Amino acid sequence: MTYVALGLSLFIVALGVLGILSPARLLAFVRRIQTPGGLYTAAALRLVFGVALFLVAPESKAPDLLRIFGVLAVLAALLTPFVGLGRFGKVVDWWSSRGSLFIRAWSAIAFALGLYVAWAVLP
């Protein structure tokens, strides 16, 4: 599970880098996955990530925080299908209307959190 958590945290890092360097490309990626399959894939990835974080937490450098992140990821995974494509589209539209600086700021947060989780799960 350590490698699953590490791999998914590095995926978050990569998305953060993409958003920092090219907010338009990140938005294009998000819009491309704005399908029923994409929504369920996102939910599945969140579920796997949350369970992985929860399971590796005891052996990690930040067990309490990783348990919290794990629970939040599982909750997000369970809620994702109920959000639906309509609301997801509205959130993406709202997010993209805030401009590239806003997207870069959120991407920087994703980048930092992804790096932190990667560091915490490494032995």
Image (cartoon, grey):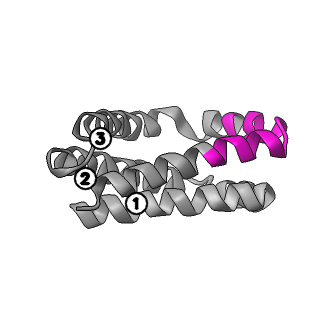
| Magenta portion: prevailing SS class | helix
| Mark 3, residue position | 66
Residue 53 vs residue 43: left or right? left
Kind of element beneath mark 1 = helix
84 lies above or below 6 = above
* Mark 3: amino acid: Leu
Q: CA distance from mark 2 to mark 1?
A: 9 Å
Label 3 sits on a secondary structure element that is: helix
First reached walking from the N terminus: tag 2 or tag 3? 2
Magenta stretch, residue numbers = 91-108
The dot on residue 52 is 2
Name the residue nearer the viewer: 2 or 98: 2
Query: Residue at position x 38%, y 50% from top?
Result: 117
Please provide percent x and percent y for residue 69: 35, 38
Q: Are marks 2 and 1 in contact (CB under 8 Å)?
A: yes
First along the sequence among labels 2 and 1: 1
Compared to residue 91, the image places residue 122 above or below, namely: below
Rendering quarter of residue 94: top right
Residue type indicated by callout 2: Ala
Q: Total of numbered circles in the picture?
A: 3
Q: Residues within 10 Å of mark 1 (few under 14, many from 20)?
A: many
* Residue that badge 1 annotates: 8
Distance from Cα at disc 3 to Cα at disc 1 = 13 Å
Residue 92 on the magenta segment? yes
At x 31% / y 35%, what residue is drawn?
65
Q: Using the numbered discs, state the Cα–Cα distance from disc 2 to disc 3 in whole angstroms.
A: 10 Å
Which image quadrant is residue 85 in?
Answer: top right
